[in-house]
Image (spheres, rainbow, N blue to C red):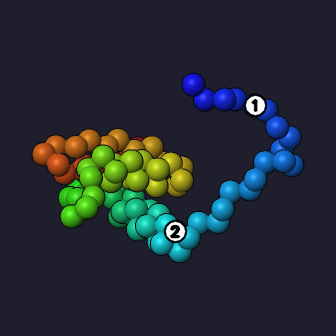
Amino acid sequence: MAEFTVIKDSDAPRPARQTGRLAARMREYEKYIDAVPPGKVGRLTPSRGETARGIALRISRAAKRQGKSSNTWVVDGTVYFSLS
């Protein structure tokens, strides 16, 4: 089991800044969110080395960063998503 302790805020290390690569990937998925108008569904097919689950998670996180709610589902390895 994990060991839990409580420390002062000033003693906690600060999070590292996002690398350019991570920030670029986040922007990529935010663009997918922006491209889907109300009443439409986005579709993403994983490329080599990607998983449908990973893509669905990144879509959900991108929507949340933009204050939107997403619904994602996977059918035959393809990720579909809608926004509300």
Residue receiving disc 2: 23
**Looking at the picture, which amino acid does disc 1 mark?**
Thr
Between 34 and 12, the one nearer to me in the picture:
12
Label 2: how many Cα within 10 Å (few below 14, some 14–19, many 20+): few
| Among the 4 quarters of the image, the one containing residue 50 | bottom left
Q: Which quadrant holds the N terminus?
A: top right
* Residues at marks 1 and 2, CA–CA distance in whole angstroms: 31 Å
Label 1: how many Cα within 10 Å (few below 14, some 14–19, many 20+): few
- SS type, badge 1: loop
Furthest residue toward left: 76
Instruction: Tell whether label 2 touches label 1 (CB within 8 Å).
Output: no
Query: Residue shown at 59%/66% (left/top)?
Result: 18
Query: Residue shown at 19%/51% (left/top)?
Result: 78
- Determine whether 53 is above or below 27 in the image: above
Furthest residue toward top: 1
Query: Residue shown at 13%/45% (left/top)?
Result: 76
Describe residue 25's horizontal placement relative to residue 7 as left or right. Answer: left
Between 50 and 56, the one nearer to me in the picture:
50
Residue 28 is labelled as: none
Work out whether residue 40 can be spotted. no
Q: Position of residue 20 (x, y in %)?
A: 53, 74
Query: Residue shown at 49%/67% (left/top)?
Result: 22
Q: Position of residue 45 (x, y in %)?
A: 20, 58
- Determine whether 31 is above or below 14 in the image: below
Residue 5 is labelled as: 1
Lower position in the chain sequence, tag 1 or tag 2: 1
**Looking at the picture, which amino acid does disc 2 mark?**
Ala
